[in-house]
Image (cartoon, rainbow, N blue to C red):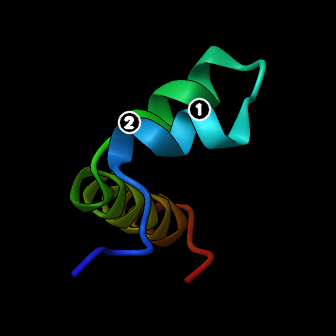
Amino acid sequence: MESDAAAPDDRADAVGTDSPIVDRWLALDRGWQALALGLAVVGAHAAGQAAGLF
């Protein structure tokens, strides 16, 4: 059975961005993207707590 989802290497080519940062982000496996995004959210929340916003 064939999957409709693109392979990780195909996603960057399918979008065709001019930004190397976006190309590198799209080339990452979705698991690594989720980890990086989760760490960014936790870091933003911790910074907000330290600043007294949350």
Return the mark for residue 39.
Answer: none
Q: Quadrant of the C terminus?
A: bottom right
Q: Position of residue 15 (x, y in %)?
A: 70, 41
Residue at image position (62%, 76%) is: 53
Q: Is residue 15 above or below residue 41?
A: above
Residue at image position (73%, 30%) is: 16
What's the residue type where badge 2 is placed?
Asp
Q: Is residue 47 left or right of residue 22?
A: left
Residue at image position (33%, 75%) is: 3
Q: Position of residue 11 (x, y in %)?
A: 51, 45
Q: CA distance from mark 2 to mark 1?
A: 7 Å
The residue beneath circle 1 is 13
Residue at image position (22%, 61%) is: 31
Density class for disc 2 (Cα within 10 Å; few <14, some 14-19, many ≥20) is some
Q: Is residue 12 left or right of residue 6?
A: right
Q: Is residue 27 above or below residue 7?
A: above
Nearest to the observer: residue 21 or residue 52: 21
What's the residue type where badge 1 is placed?
Asp
Return the mark for residue 9.
Answer: 2
Q: Are marks 2 and 1 in contact (CB under 8 Å)?
A: yes
Q: Position of residue 14 (x, y in %)?
A: 64, 42
Q: Quadrant of the N terminus?
A: bottom left
Question: Residue at the front extreme?
Answer: 1
Q: Position of residue 52 (x, y in %)?
A: 56, 73
Nearest to the observer: residue 13 or residue 24: 13
Density class for disc 1 (Cα within 10 Å; few <14, some 14-19, many ≥20) is few
Q: Secondary structure at mark 1?
A: helix
